[in-house]
Image: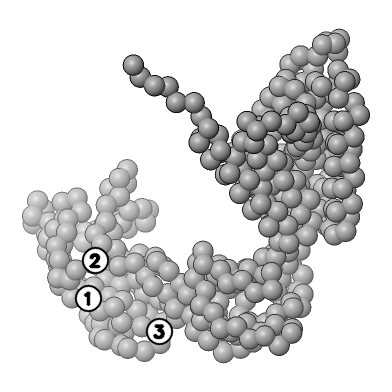
Amino acid sequence: MWKQPWGYAEGWAICAGLFFTGLVLQWHFGKVDVDIYRYPVNILIGITWLILLVSLSFIGKKRKIVRWFSGIKASLTAMISLLVMVIVMGLTRQVSPGADLSSSGGISRLGFMQMTVSWPFLLLFFYFISVLGLVTLRRLSSFRKKDIGFACNHVGLFIALTAAILGSGDLERMRMTVQADQVEWRAINLQNELVEMPLAIELHSFTIDEYPPKLLIVDNFTGKPQPENYPQNIVAEDIPMHGRIMDWEFSLIEYLPMAACYLQQDTTRFVEFHSVGATCALYVKAENKKENIRREGWVSCGNHLFPYISLPLTATESLIMPEREPRKYTSEITVYTQNGEIHAATIDVNKPFTVNGWKIYQVSYDESMGKWSTISVFELVKDPWMFLVYTGIVLMLLGALFLFSTAPVKKEK
């Protein structure tokens, strides 16, 4: 080993050395503080690093060691090593990079629970994109028309990965909780600090579109849906309707999507209630012909105002309606900016609103109030390097299209 010409053994040795060096740094110094690499420090690091890569490529291209780092053996070992780290990251529970795990032990202290800011991952990542840069520069030094696809793919990947790592220090992610009919300009950052934002949000209304209610049979002692190995349910879509769970036949007679509950001494009754705090209820008839048992009554998921109501079937089983699942939740807002701009917007999950470089996402609400929530929770994200990441992705797509369009076609005789 370490005798020219180098092979795969040296490549694996370099990757292993970087990994164990990262573990030592992680153990003694903790995670990498990405806030240190904010603008303009990240710009200076990026420019210096590019100058070094270009210098190595053109000044030392006749040296064997430089040619090895821009060759297939270094590329494969670097790529596979980084891929292994990514797989470990996918199999390990990850927590926010801003969370403090310095007092924890074991796997968390080694950085595996905050992989993107751990020394082992970042050293291998830096090594991989350095090799990628040298490979790309070596191919571009003798560029030909047929290399367009290769150049687009590799340059695009290099730009996307480099922008992602250098821009991590400039990424801002805030969470803002807004009350209905109030204007909020403060948000909480990843360090749980309250900061003033360059924009304010006024919440006008919050609405939830829910899926139809479901009915389940649960065990009265364990609370588990039945049958335990393969739970069954009835979705109340068209009323009246019939359904079956195990040996029970159910007839859904009446559905009140907006209801109020009246509890009396011996009976429970639901009536229509078109006001704030209404719940939903189903009147159900149940029959078990095998055991010759009949039951009927109201079932409701309840909410913060009205109680949860189940229908007892036997001494060990009951029919219940779990909380209805939200299909979509929407906030009607007005955004005010520091320069006096006013923007009206409707924000859904996965449909953010963009203003002055900030993306505003709908992420949560007051779950204890359900559809009657008067609180909306937004995530505000600003990533000034994202356009470079998108540029890299577009280049990779263009490279793939070029390779596809110029691929040789075999003609059948």
Q: Is residue 97 left or right of residue 288?
A: right
Other-residue count near label 3 (Cα within 10 Å), few / some / many at <14 / 14–19 / ≥20 = some
The disc placed on residue 43 is none
Q: Is residue 250 left or right of residue 59?
A: left
Other-residue count near label 2 (Cα within 10 Å), few / some / many at <14 / 14–19 / ≥20 = some
Color theme of the render:
one colour
Q: Is residue 281 left or right of residue 18?
A: left
Residue 272 spot, x, y in % from top left: 26, 86
Discs 2, 1 touching: Cβ within 8 Å: yes
Amino acid at pointer 2: Ala
Q: Give the CA separation, mark 1 to mark 3.
A: 17 Å
Other-residue count near label 1 (Cα within 10 Å), few / some / many at <14 / 14–19 / ≥20 = many
Q: Residue at x 63, y 86 (%)?
A: 342
Q: Nearer the viewer, residue 145 or 221?
A: 145
Q: Nearer the viewer, residue 248 or 144?
A: 144
SS under mark 3: loop
The disc placed on residue 255 is 1
Mark 3 or mark 1, which is nearer the start of the sequence? 1
Find disc 3 in the rendering and name its residue.
Answer: 277
Q: Residue at x 39, y 66 (%)?
A: 327
Determine if residue 175 is in view.
no
Find disc 2 in the rendering and name its residue.
Answer: 236
Q: Nearer the viewer, residue 73 or 381?
A: 73
Q: Residue at x 61, y 49 (%)?
A: 394
Determine if residue 75 is in view.
yes
Q: Nearer the viewer, residue 391 or 324?
A: 391
Mark 1 or mark 2, which is nearer the start of the sequence? 2
Q: Is residue 113 left or right of residue 369?
A: right
Q: Give the CA separation, mark 2 to mark 3.
A: 21 Å
Q: Answer with the quarter of the image where residue 338 lies.
A: bottom right
